[in-house]
Amino acid sequence: MGFESEKQYFFDLLLDSGADFPIAFASWRLYGEVVFVSDKFKTLIHASSIVINVYDFSQLVYKYFGNFLYIAAEKVFVQQSIKNEYSALLKSKYDEEFLHRLVFNKIKKVYVYTIEKSQDHEKVKVKNDIKDNIVDSIPIYIWKKNLDLKLIYCNKKYSDALETSQESAISNNLRLVNTRNEKYATYTARQSFIEKVVIKGNRRYLEITEQPLSGNTSALGFAIDVTDREELKKEYKTYKKQTEETLDQISVPIAIFDEKMSLVFANSAIEKLFGLDINLLREKNFSEIISVLLEKGAILSNSNEKEFKEKAVSLFTAIIEPYHTSISLQNGKIMNVTISPNHGGGLIFLLQDISDTIALKREVSSISAVQQETLDHLKEGVVVFGTDNRVKMINSAIENILENKEIINDVGIHIKDFFEKISPIFNLEQKTGLCIEKIINMSTQRVQFSDTIPLSSGKVLDYSYVPLPDGLNLIRFFDATDKANLERALEEKTDIISQIDKIKANLISYISYELRAPLNTIMGFSDILLNQYFGELNEKQIQYCQGIIGSVKKTTEVVNAIINLTSIEVGQIKLKYTEVNLFKFIESSLELFKNRAKFQDVTLKNNFNDEKLTVYFDELSMNQVMFQLISKALKLTPPKGCVSISVEISQSEPDYFNIIVSDTGIGISKEDLEKMNNTLSVGMGNAPIDNTIEFGLVLANNIVHLHNGRITIASEDGQGTVVKCHLPVNKCIN
């Protein structure tokens, strides 16, 4: 049996019949005058002869099938069809459907016009396609062997794989793959297996199928290339292994069950959590694994074992979306279980320890309760609102302060709604709007502020905004009525004091005129008498005049001191800071007392020798201070003694420098020294002047206080006195 007959035999196996179907056709030359028609075509159009002129042929075709021939000829002639042909499915006047095709042969310059019934055409077309294209073009290797295991047929795919022709492959009995069972007589059913072969230098996987044909006289075989599928399987196995290794490193326990409820994967975190060998559990289904966990007490159940297992097993048919639940373990842990459907069937269990989260929530709840209890015991009204401007917490004191018993239940409302609810207690509607706007703006900027609002009841309400560290916001309300009343009383008292100060100022002017004028008169007349302008005086009269002059001077000093003290207290003295050379300032102060010191036989000494140091203070008032301090020192120093002035930076208070006036006089007793320091430390105008301290020293102390400084005295009875004048160093410029 030759190749063509074997091929025809195989085609006949695929088709019920190999009979040809007749086709009606007609043909004529280009520019010819006659048309040759087949008997089938002649019968179809009822032609009188098989040779017809072109005009009559066109009319007959038009009568039965319309204008097809004219349209087809025009399209073919202008080569609108790639294959130089035109086809259409048309009905005749008898409603039969025919396939019309007009083809032009360029070489022979002949038209061929064919007509066939549509059903007949399809059958012929299928048969021809199977014979000419399908078997050789399908991506399957097909062969046939006889009882001697010799190749008697193969398709083109088979021979191309062996890089030869079909005839050569058959004649040389070339095999694509060695079959596993070479004796077809023993075949009772088809066999399939996968083999690895090399085709055109490439390694391929083929799925081989061989089956004995009827009578066991031959066998038909075919192979399908499954390389992509096998490679995909390999990739899937690699991906699955990598995924399982990755999941095994995760601390979150994960278990995967298939559609048969068998355990297919569980990471090491599952073994660690339940203390079980996962390899032993792989042979058990989900229900059996639940039984093992319950028996070992690894998980706790509120219901009986049977009910718990039934509920757990029902998850495999009930869950279509991720489901969340929780279980309790014997060790006290609480696990959140996320159950998700597996795409391949079954379920995925993911467990997360939420024990710490639950404990933290309880702690937060406890802290919140403590906070609420603490806030409820405050006298101030407190409102806490979050970043969404909704009230989170309100204490009980706010009911009385805002005169509203219902707002304690307003947790959750917007802060604007909260203020609108309490707006009737405010005196001005504009003030309420301003308050709300300010609080919302400040909460956005998180800037602390406070303000005061008068209430319609006459009360005064203080409120303040405080940003909290956790992003919350706090508003504090305080009944400031008593505070406002106290401030009002203080303002009234301040007005009274201001009026008293004015009276003092007027008194100073009065004393200055009423006392100084008579004293100056007495002083002038006494001086005239002492100088004996109107006659000589005896010794006794001279002594009286000298006593009058001394008493007047003493009284004038006291009056001047009182006036200066009062001027400081009422604020009439204003300091004028200027830059002063400290060395020259001390020298000029000592210069005023040179004659007096020489008369008392007392040495004046300047221990400060920095001629460049400058300071800032009121030079006129500080001259008065130095005058009083040096005068005091000279009074306490006996003949042959010494009065010295020095400057130092305070060791105990680095922010101050000291002007020190020291003497080697009789000193001050411990009791008198304590009284003097107490009087000086109280400050100006705040303590009664003791008779142990002179007006001049109090005056100096008050002036130094105006400079934000102070005076301290150190002395021992019979050991001299040291007076330190402390002044702020920030006014000192080197």
Image (tube, rainbow, N blue to C red):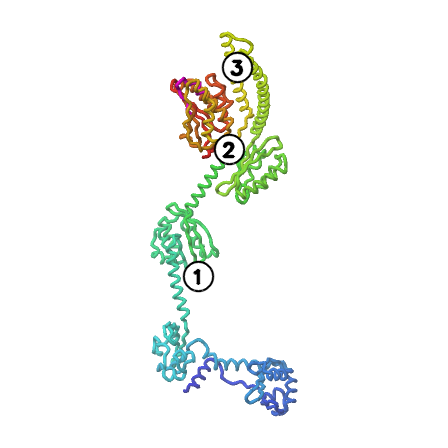
Q: From the image, which quarter does the C terminus lie in?
A: top left
Residue that appears at 39% across and 53% down:
253
CB under 8 Å between discs 3 and 2: no
Mark 3 falls on what kind of element?
helix
Mark 2 falls on what kind of element?
loop
Give the CA separation, mark 2 to mark 1.
62 Å
Give the CA separation, mark 3 to mark 2.
67 Å
Quarter of the figure with residue 210:
bottom left
Q: Position of residue 438 (x, y in %)?
A: 58, 40
Q: From the image, which quarter does the N terminus lie in?
A: bottom left
Comes first in the chain, label 2 or label 1: 1
Q: Which mark is residue 378?
A: 2
Identity, as a three-letter code, of the amino acid under mark 1: Gly
Comes first in the chain, label 1 or label 3: 1
Give the CA separation, mark 1 to mark 3.
121 Å
Q: Nearer the observer, disc 3 or disc 2?
A: 3
Quarter of the figure with residue 206:
bottom left
Reading the image, the residue beneath label 3 is: 552
Identity, as a three-letter code, of the amino acid under mark 2: Leu
Q: Is residue 609 left or right of residue 434?
A: left
Comes first in the chain, label 3 or label 2: 2
Q: Which mark is residue 344?
A: 1
Q: Is residue 467 above or below residue 546?
A: below
Residue 715 in sight from this viewpoint: no
Structural crowding at the residue carrying mark 1, measured as other residues with C-alpha within 10 Å and reported as few (<14), some (14–19) or many (≥20): few
The region drawn magenta spans 632-644
Residue that appears at 49% across and 84% down:
18
